[in-house]
Image (cartoon, rainbow, N blue to C red):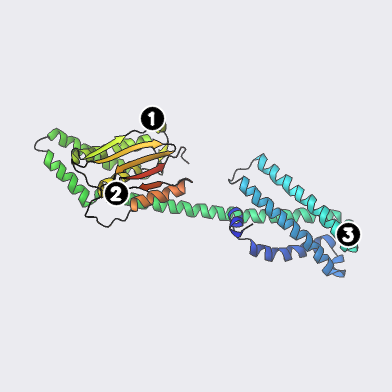
Amino acid sequence: MSVSTSIKYLGFDDRWLICLGVPVVSLLVSLMTFGDAFTELPLACFLVGMAFTVCYWILIRKVIIEYHKRFDDYRFTVRRLGFVIFWVGLSIILVKVSITQIIHNCFPHIAELAHKNMISELLTTLIIIAMMFFLYEGIYYFNKSRLTEIEKNKLERITAEQKLSTLKNQVNPHFLFNSLNTLVSIIPEEPNLAINFVQKLSKTYRNILEVRDEKLITIEKELEALDSYIYLLKTRFQGKIQILNTLDESIMHHFVLPLSLQILIENAVKHNITSKNKPLKVSLSNDNDYVTVRNNLQRKQQQYNSTKLGLANIKSRYELLTNQEIIVEETAEEFVVKLPIIKQAS
């Protein structure tokens, strides 16, 4: 078994523990099993103790790895207990039968001493196995808890960056200038439209503040928050942008990242030409287990340097929340981002 596989299921590289533990445990096994006889035949007793220790170590280590492959959470169940008892018991029987037979052939005098101390040998075996099991388990769950805390802190940091990025994108001078410029142009001729525009602008900011502390949001609420932003875009571009939503009702109670759809639409507007002759077409749809945001590709000739922070943060947050990754596809005609649908909030 490779080192990387062992680390995955043991939680650490245990080579140092094996090198240090086998000699020490072998000595303890020899002393506890043979008692005074150890002083008369120290080398032979030690070799016997090492034979048992190495075999138990290999088998118990294998049991622990298989145990973590099958049960990767913290819940205690009868099935887990049964798994441990069965395989540990089988390991003890295998080692006892095989190693005892070898010792009888190689060290008959030592075997006779061990046979006289069967209770001591059994207690020693149980103590050593329990010590090995709980040592590995203690290190495993300590490291797992530490990694969980690190991932939690990383998610919180990325979430904080996402909040700042979203607010920065929305409150930057260009966005305010464009929104206010649109408002100024419609006030004289369409005061009612101007009132609606201000209300939607206010609602857009309020929606950002309401959902920015959430890790996940239902698709239904995400679309409600997106509605006012789409209204602002359509009012501003006056037929130069078309947004089509064909998301199924059946996925409305599933989850995506807050503001993820808005960020993807922002990116489409930011990087593409919008005109009546070449309207920007953005569509929201779902297929299989993804929400798909698709836009026709007609990049602006004068490109500013883009940090792509919004899309990068969405990717990073999905990596921490689910084992699925977002899918980004680009052709000569269109740009597509597929967000995994999270069916249950953790």
The label nearer to you, 3 versus 2, is 3
Mark 2 lies on a secondary structure that is helix
- Residue located beneath label 3 in the image: 104
Mark-to-mark CA distance, 2 and 1: 29 Å
* Quarter assignment of residue 336: top left
- Residue located beneath label 2 in the image: 167
Answer left or right for 276 relative to 221. left
216 or 246, which lies in front?
246
Q: Position of residue 3 (x, y in %)?
A: 61, 59
> What residue sits 12% from the left and 42% below the top?
184
Residue pushed farthest front?
332
Q: Position of residue 251 (x, y in %)?
A: 41, 33
Q: Amino acid at mark 1?
A: Glu
Answer left or right for 261 relative to 239. right
Q: Can residue 11 be seen?
A: no
- Residue located beneath label 1 in the image: 249
Q: Tell which circle, 3 or 2, labels the residue nearer the N-terminal end.
A: 3
> What residue sits 63% from the left and 61% below the top?
14
The label nearer to you, 2 versus 1, is 1
Q: Tell which circle, 2 or 1, labels the residue nearer the N-terminal end.
A: 2
Mark 3 lies on a secondary structure that is helix
* Quarter assignment of residue 208: top left
Q: Is residue 16 above or below residue 243?
A: below
141 or 58, which lies in front?
58
Q: Position of residue 280 (x, y in %)?
A: 24, 42
* Quarter assignment of residue 123: bottom right
Mark 1 lies on a secondary structure that is helix
- In the picture, the quarter occupied by the N terminus is bottom right
